[in-house]
Each structure stands twice: as structure tokens, then as C-alpha cells.
Amino acid sequence: MNQSRPVRLPRERNAPAARFRRVLGAAALAVPLLAVAGVAELPGTSGAVTPAIALNQVWSRTGLPDAGSPIALSSPNIASIAGQPAVVVGDRVGYVWAFLLGSGATLNGWPFHAGAPVDSTPSVDPTTGTIFVGSGNAASPYGGNYQAITPTQPPGDLWAVRAANPSTDPNPYNGVQAGLAVGNLQGGEDVVAGSLGENEYALTNGGAVLGGFPWYQADSNFTTPAIADLYGTSQNQIIEGGDSSAGVSYGVTYQNGGHLRVLSPTGNAYTGSPSGGLICSVNYTQTIQSSPAVGEFLGGSTVGIVFGTGNTFTSSQTNQVIATDSHCNSRWATTLDGSTATESPALADVLGNGQLQVVEGTTGGTVYVLNGSNGSVAWQAQTAGPVIGSVVTADLGAGYQDLIVPTTNGVQIFDGKSGALLGTMASGYAFQNAPLVTDDANGTIGITMAGYGSTNQGAVFHYEVAGSTGSKANETGAWPMFHHDPQLTGDAGTPPPVVNVPCNAPSATPSGFYLTGTDGGVFNFGNLPFCGSTGNITLNQPVVGIATTHNAGGYWLVARDGGIFAFGNAATYGSLPGIGVHVTNAVGIAATNDGNGYWVVASDGGIFTFGDAPFLGSMGGQHLNEPIVGMARDPATGGYWEVASDGGIFTFDAPFLGSMGNKHLNQPIVGIAAAPGGNGYWEVASDGGIFTFGPGATFYGSTGAIHLDQPIIGIAPTPSGAGYWLTAADGGVFAFGTAPFYGSLPGSGVVVRNITAVAGAP
């Protein structure tokens, strides 16, 4: 790293004078083939099955009263309605249908009418059973809502929120074609999806707009976002595609094409920009309208993101499947024989080798299995018609995942290892969405598919696979429905997060300190709570710093690569790997007064800001005699100091009160601490020598003349500033002034030599 870099975007002084995104409409945003303008009539409507495995049709509902506007892109999902398992799916009349899974009977009071076409796949809240759906599509883009429906008979309209555009857009509202992914974004079961307009919304399950939203997406978003903890921090991120049109808005220049982006769960909060909060993003010359899938398919425990491209622009990236790592760095791209625009990929172990492969169908009438590590084709097979919907998988008895492929002429089953055709269901009917795999009441695997027949009327079929084991429907390595699960998270599995233990801020005045080692193990002293650690996981880089929240109810760890791990009430506002910044020289972290942000400092003096931490300058890119070893926040001004190993002090909106720069030191400086009341700071050397500056920092003693088993690594003042603790690399603790002695690691029988940082009570 050779220069400082504030993370957040500057606030735009003037809103865009005019909307720049391309005009929505059936011609401009038509999904290819049958998806928008209408569905072609198809010959034959037999329910014939080509048997190679035993497929039993349990029920069907054909000729639904939606002629001309049938079930199209909305995929069936499983919900519990009035305590009964039911299939829910939307159509272009605007109905959300509910059929009993076991019999196909229509539930009392259903379908629910959403008021605009429903191409969105319904999602389900796992705690309340609430059903969420978007309404409005590319053919009817200006109507529709983010919608919540009660799982009752009859259904209730729980809430509806319109997707409002910025005031510069001539169209005040836009619909929502994407599915609403469900997951914990800001402390509850929240929902999020982009809209067909310029803003993206995230809402609580009660319909309240989350802080940092609406988020300015600038152009239409058709993709159902994935929700996953990409970085093992116990904090989910939002992973999605998006369209892009050439123009400039809020100081950001856009090109024709599309994006993949990873968005903070706090949206644009604290960033000063309507489009702020991106953890990483990458631009493409083609639209990204395929919903991304997330999982460890790149090899080992490496988390990847995979998606298909659209076909809006003339581009070499048309008809591709693209994989990136979790930081949006490209890993591979494979060009297939047809569009991958709406055919969102599945991640499943279809080869039976314990690894995840990428499964994709195309409008060219081919289904592909791609090796997840490099995108090479493991096998491909011709299908009965174009594949517009997403492939799902199930272990139908062979011990690995078989493919269940929707086509415009039935749903076909292919052997996962060989690609051999095993059976065809509902030939003569067209399916533009993903089938649904369930664990049926009789213990077998059920398959539900929803589409339309030759009269353009909706049709729903339910089959069971004789001899299969229903409990395997959701096993590891399966992809049983659109976007993986009823919450539509798109998450096939990420590494386990750090250990985050429930904890509370001290009921009395906080007093004490934390120690952390290179492995992220945390040791608490005094009345400060233990909230968890990274001691149980493998780190990319060692931990180098710790900072306590404003009320001692949690803490942050920072690793040498700028990775952030949050515990207790410490919120994650971003990290250097998360924004695609690759360093190995981070040396410390400091939190803001209110705990809503933090700074990360590097050995070259570069400062990186997250949350509400302001960028006030840094030594990045400037000559240093010795490296920076730490920083401290000035509680009086909100600024900060950097300290170098020679004791030199560099001030940023904080007063210069003196330093050890250009003075003789027996041992190098290893840390700095600010006086809690401001107007002073302590420097500490590796031999425990203490140097005080400013009237707020008083000398209470040192270990400069004491033999140490291990060098001192840091200093933490008491909350009153009337004392301090010094700690050594073995966890030995030395208390001075009024600082109570709460114990030490050697005194507790803990043998370590890797303690790297100390942080005191706020």
C-alpha cells in the first residue's frame, strides 16, 4: 500500500439533472424467447413420462384462469399455510397461487391478487412463515410492490411497499421482478431485492425500510440477490447483479453493460453517497440478469460467486457463465451455446466427488455441468427444448445429485455423473422457471413444476420418485429449488463463521482490558465480557489489533490483511479484503466515539475508514523514517494520532503535544494510548518504558528497569486515565496508578507467546 485511501465515497453536491438509465418497456427490457411479450402456443398437452426411473404423477392443476398471462418466470416454493405444506407460485395476471403439496387442492381464499404481474419467485420467512413476493415485470414496469402475504386461509395483505425512484426520474415508481431474498441484514429476518427502477429496497419483515436504504442501483435489477456471510464474520452481505446504461449520476460514471456487486447490509449508511456501501463490484459489457449463486465451488474452502450474463448489448460476454471470488476478482468465464440471462446457475455435487459443480441450462437447448474450479465442461447434453428456467438437483437414489431440467417441452431428469436421460415429465408443457424438490409425506422425493400449456393457461404438476429418500431433498450438495432454499438465499454453503458468544455490556462501570493473540484468541479481564474469538478458525493473516465498543459490549479484531472480525454489539462496517484492497501491513484499529465506525492503520501510515469514521489525512505515500506501529483516537476532537517505532507522532485533527522522534530510545516504541479525557497521550516501548505528552497523560510508572520474560506489546489506560496496564507478549500484565490488577495469562497457567494487542474499557 503506498497511499492512504478513505473507503467511503464523497457526497455529491448536486443530484443528477436528468435520469440516464435506459427507458423501461417491453421492447427495451424483454427477457428472451417467451418471457415477456407472451407465451407461444405449444402443440400437445399430454402428461407423458419417459420412464427410466419410476416417476409417479400425484396431481396436476391445468387450465388455470390466467389465460394469456400464465405462470412464467415465477418458480414454485414451499410454504406452510395454516399448518399445511403448500406450493406457492405467481402468474402474470398478478395471482399468487397456493396448492396443498399432497393433493393440489386450492387453499381457502387463495389465490392472493398482488395487483400487478408476478414474475418474482415467492420467498418464505422461516420464523413467521410470511410469504414475500415482488410484483410488476418488464412488460408492466411501473406498477407493483414489495409485498408481504400472511400464510393463512384466506391470505392477508400484511404490507406493500412501492419502489420509489429519485425525484429526477420522470416515473415515480417501478415494479419488482426479482425475488425477495430473506436473511439477517440488520438484526432480524429482513428482505431485500432490487427493483426495475433506480432504487433497491431492504425491509424488515414488518415492512419498515432498513437504514441505508433505498440504495441507489442506478439501473434496472432483475436478479434475486444472494444473502451470505462471505467473509466468516457472522455478518451477511448482499450479492447481486444489475444492469448499467452509459451516463453519470451522483459522481459515478456508468457504461453500457452490467455489474456484479457485493453490498453492505447497511446499504449506503454513513457513506455520504446514495450508491455508497459497496464492498466490491465489477463491471461487464453485458447486462447481468441471472441471479448469482454463492458457495465453496472454487476449490477448498474458497468462496465463489457464479452467474450468467444477459443479452441486451452486443458483447463478447453474451452467453457466458462467469465466476468470481468473494472479493469480485474474476476466476473464470465460460461461453455456452445460448443465453444464460434468466437461467440462474445451480451449485451441486452432481459428479459425486464431494465438490460443488456449476449447473447451467441455455436457450440453445443444452444443459451443462461445469467444473467449479476452472469452468471447464464436465459434460453437456441436449434437452427437449430451450432452457429458460433454472436447473435444480436431487439425489434420486444413486448417491449423487441428478439434474432436473425445465424446458419449453417438459421437465427432464439427467443422471448427474453421465448425463444420461432418465425421464421426462409433463412433455408438451412449457416451463420457464425452476422446479421444486420436496420431502413428501410418504418419505419420497417430490417434484413440483409450474408452467403453461398450449392455450397459454397456467399448469402445475406434482410427481414423486418411487424408491427415493425424501430426507435427502435438502442434503449437503443439493440444489432443490430456485436460489437454493425457501428464503432464496442463493447460498450453497460458506465456511463457518467465527465463534460469536452471546454477551452483554457490563451493568456496572466498565473496567478492565482485552488481550488478543495472532490467532485471534481473546482473553478478558475485569468486568469486560467475553464475546467470542477467531481462535477456532484458520486465518489468512494474523490478528494485529483490537478495539472495544463504546459501552464494552463487544469488540473488533483486525488482521494484518485488514480483515475485520466483529463480536458482541460491534457491527461490521467493512474490511480491506471486502473492498478488494490487498495489503499485508495493517498494524492497528481504533473505534469512533459512538462505536459506529473504525479506522484501520497500516505500517506505511495509510488510513482506511469504515462506518462513520472520517478520513482526516494520513502518512500514506509520505516518507517515514520508521514504520507506523499504532494509532489512537483523540476523544476530545474526534481526530487521531499515528505513532512510529522511533516515537514520531503524526497528528490529524488532533493536537501535537510532543513525541520521542529524534530522541534516544533504548527500545523501539510499540504502542500509543490516548488520555481518556483528551489533551494527552502515552507512548510505550518494548521494554515497558513510558513517555507522556500533554497534561492529560500522567506518568505512573514503567517496566523500563525491570527484567521482562517477553517484550511489552501495548498499553491500555483506565477509563479515568488515573492509571494504565502494560502487557507483554506472553500475556503478562503490569498495573500502574489506580489500575487494578485483574490477573495475567502466566498467572492463570496459560502459556502463550503470541499476544499482539491490548484494548482497555471505554
Image (spheres, grey):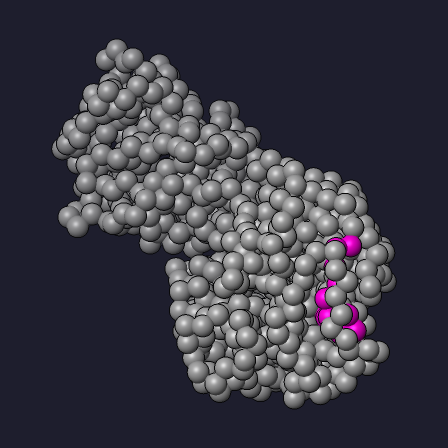
Q: Position of residue 661 (x, y in %)?
A: 41, 25
* 391 sits to left or right of 520: right
* 572 sits to left or right of 194: left
Q: Is residue 261 magenta?
A: no
Report the residue at 48% width, 32% height from top: 538
Q: Position of residue 174 (x, y in %)?
A: 62, 79
- Picture quadrant where residue 188 is located: bottom left
Residue lying farthest top?
A: 707
Q: Can residue 296 be seen from the camera position used here?
A: yes
Quarter occupied by the N terminus? top right
Q: Can residue 267 be seen from the camera position used here?
A: no
Image position of 479 with respect to 24: above or below: above
- Picture quadrant where residue 339 is located: bottom right
Report the residue at 45% width, 51% height from top: 235
- Picture quadrant where residue 329 is located: top right
Report the residue at 63% width, 59% height from top: 465
Residue closer to the observer: 143 or 679: 143
Report the residue at 54% width, 71% height from top: 101
In magenta, the rendered stretch is 421-432
Q: Position of residue 421 (x, y in %)?
A: 78, 54
Quarter occupied by the C terminus? top left
Residue closer to the observer: 470 or 741: 470
